């Protein structure tokens, strides 16, 4: 039984989920005019405005980077610890 996870598979999955959530957030902010400009949301979006296509593309690129960074850390720890748990 193969127990190792793939960084590529987990990275793509995490990035896809985060991209879908951020797209929903962007669409919601377009309908709720003015709510995306307050300080906490703007800080969470790294100061990039979602109202431009460049901002949207940079946001998606950042999400892919974060997804793969998370998966690299998680999969590395998982692959190191699962043989110890299984025995």
Image (cartoon, rainbow, N blue to C red):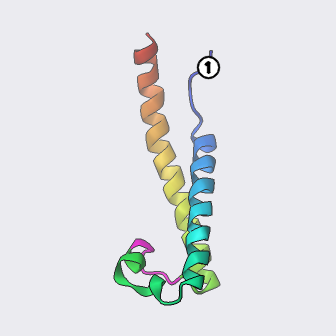
Identify the residue shown where x is 56% and y is 58%.
Answer: 18
Image side of residue 2 versus residue 65, left or right: right
Q: Quadrant of the C terminus?
A: top left
Q: Which stretch is magenta?
A: 44-49
- Residue 47 on the magenta segment: yes
Residue occupied by mark 1: 2
Question: Up-down: is 87 above or below 44?
Answer: above
Return the x and y of residue 6 as percentages of the image width and height: 59, 36
Identify the residue shown where x is 63% and y is 41%.
Answer: 9
Return the x and y of residue 23 as percentages of the image width and height: 61, 69
Magenta segment main secondary structure: loop
Identify the residue shown where x is 60% and y is 86%.
Answer: 52
Label 1, secondary structure: give it. Answer: loop
Question: Up-down: is 10 above or below 18?
Answer: above
Return the x and y of residue 29 as percentages of the image width and height: 54, 80
Question: Which one is in front, 27 or 66?
Answer: 27
Farthest residue to the left: give it.
39
Return the x and y of residue 39 as percentages of the image width and height: 35, 82
Residue count near mark 1 (Cα–Cα under 10 Å), binned few <14, some 14–19, many ≥20: few
Question: Which one is in front, 23 or 12?
Answer: 23
């Amino acid at each position: 039984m193969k127990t190792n996870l793939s960084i590529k598979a987990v990275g793509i999955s995490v990035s896809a989920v985060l991209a879908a959530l951020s797209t929903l957030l962007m669409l919601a902010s377009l309908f709720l005019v003015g709510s995306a400009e307050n300080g906490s949301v703007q800080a969470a979006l790294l100061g990039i405005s979602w109202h431009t296509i460049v901002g949207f593309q940079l946001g998606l690129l950042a999400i892919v980077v974060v997804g793969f960074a998370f998966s690299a850390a998680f999969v590395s720890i998982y692959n190191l610890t699962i043989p110890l748990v299984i025995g």
